[in-house]
Image (spheres, rainbow, N blue to C red):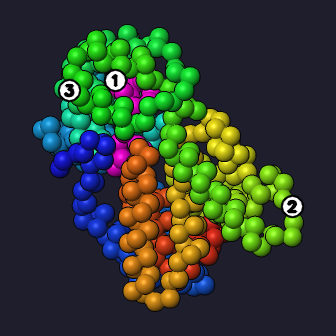
């Protein structure tokens, strides 16, 4: 497998992934008025949610390294990971990572833990990029963050972990730049070209940014897509002057079919996957994105995907299976290209959110099908 200069390796598919593509996302078109159709898609997404995707990845890497194990071999897997932390990284395996191996899905608050585990499992640059997308279910190498930039540089240029530690220590005091004047793709290109630690540190000191300055292209595209949604809404509200707050509420209702407030139900009672429902946009978070305030990666990615979905399928006419299939492929390619251009994880159908969105796209009425899916989770 090769990786391009924009850090987008093609994700290879195993038999299970092919099944999800062929049956759940690209099978016979569904009818949103048929409750059984909608329920079957949700059921498959819940099965994806239940899969131990991180442990599947760790087990596969350990097996490649000569320690054969499966995703349910928790104790031998944990023993080997602990050993590798001490021998390769030089410190004990953190409690957080131990909890991952025991079955807790990783959060996104400490990216160093994610990269450290990849180093402990002796992954190279390409393997790390794929592991983030397929097993952490998030993006690799957010290079406007100094930690991610250090690990990308070190992995690409095959630096030792001791070199990583030194680079992280030296970059700890770097001050975020006031303006995001360099694109992510330019930063990636420079990091891949530099193979001198001091030169890299000088470059990094001039190109690290805070949360609001990251994902500038995504924020710009989201703003454009929001304006498209609102132009559609205003066709039906031409005789009214809408406040920004009301327009925000209508935008969310257009994307989700309801004024989405999330669910307080315990996981055992959930009707939709947590990885689908968490970080869905609402009135408040959409406003923060528009204003350029702090917004999580997951919120930005899901908001972008929902906006592209609504605007694409508002105009599309899904009248027969052939048309539905053609529109779906066009939507898939368009959305995937936008995600990649923004530095986001590309579409991956074993992610419950991606899977359900594509499942809805394979429908005679994709927008209404999405509404039905979300409504199902609220009942």
* Of the image marks 2 and 3, the number of the one nearer the N terminus: 3
Residue 100 in which image quadrant: top left
The answer for how far apart the CA atoms under marks 2 and 3 are is: 57 Å
Circle 3 sits in a helix, a strand or a loop, which is it?
loop
Q: Nearer the viewer, residue 337 or 180?
A: 180
The answer for how far apart the CA atoms under marks 3 and 1 are is: 11 Å
* Of the image marks 1 and 2, the number of the one nearer the N terminus: 1
Q: Is residue 64 above or below residue 82?
A: below
Q: Quadrant of the C terminus?
A: bottom right
Q: Is 228 positioned to the left or the right of 240 in the image?
A: left
* Of the image marks 3 and 1, the number of the one nearer the N terminus: 1
Q: Residue at x 59, y 73 (%)?
A: 314
Q: Residue at x 50, y 44 (%)?
A: 217
The answer for how far apart the CA atoms under marks 1 and 2 are is: 50 Å
- Numbered tag placed on residue 14 in the rendering: none
* Residue of label 2: 241
Q: Which residues are magenta?
A: 132-151
* Residue of label 3: 157
* Residue of label 1: 150
């Amino acid at each position: 497998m090769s990786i391009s200069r924009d850090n987008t390796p093609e994700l290879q598919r195993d038999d299970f992934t092919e099944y999800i593509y062929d049956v759940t996302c690209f099978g016979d078109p569904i009818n949103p008025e048929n409750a059984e159709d909608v329920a079957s898609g949700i059921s498959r997404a819940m099965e994806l949610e239940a899969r131990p995707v991180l442990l599947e990845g760790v087990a596969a890497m350990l097996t490649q390294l000569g320690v054969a194990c499966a995703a349910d071999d928790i104790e031998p897997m944990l023993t080997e990971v602990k050993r590798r932390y001490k021998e390769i990284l030089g410190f004990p395996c953190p409690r957080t990572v131990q909890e991952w191996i025991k079955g807790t899905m990783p959060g996104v608050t400490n990216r160093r833990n994610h990269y450290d585990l990849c180093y402990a499992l002796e992954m190279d640059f390409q393997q790390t990029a794929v592991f983030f997308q397929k097993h952490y279910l998030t993006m690799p190498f957010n290079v406007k963050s100094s930690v991610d930039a250090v690990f990308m540089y070190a992995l690409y240029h095959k630096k030792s972990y001791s070199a990583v530690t030194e680079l992280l220590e030296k970059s700890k005091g770097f001050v975020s730049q006031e303006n995001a004047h360099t694109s992510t793709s330019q930063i990636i290109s420079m990091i891949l070209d530099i193979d001198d630690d001091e030169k890299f540190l000088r470059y990094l000191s001039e190109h690290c940014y805070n949360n609001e300055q990251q994902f500038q292209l995504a924020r710009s595209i989201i703003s454009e897509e929001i304006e498209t949604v609102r132009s559609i809404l205003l066709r039906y509200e031409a005789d009214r002057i809408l406040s920004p707050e009301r327009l925000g509420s209508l935008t969310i209702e257009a994307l989700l079919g309801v004024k989405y407030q999330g669910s307080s139900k315990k996981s055992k009672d959930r009707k939709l996957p947590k990885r689908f429902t968490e970080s869905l946009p609402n009135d408040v978070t959409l406003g923060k994105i528009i204003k350029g305030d702090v917004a999580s990666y997951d919120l930005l990615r899901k908001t972008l995907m929902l906006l592209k979905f609504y605007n694409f399928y508002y105009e599309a006419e899904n009248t027969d299976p052939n048309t539905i299939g053609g529109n779906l492929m066009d939507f898939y390619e368009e959305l995937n290209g936008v995600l990649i251009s923004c530095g986001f994880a590309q579409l991956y159908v074993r992610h419950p959110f991606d899977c359900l969105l594509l499942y809805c796209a394979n429908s005679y009425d994709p927008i209404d099908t999405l509404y039905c899916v979300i409504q199902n989770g609220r009942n």
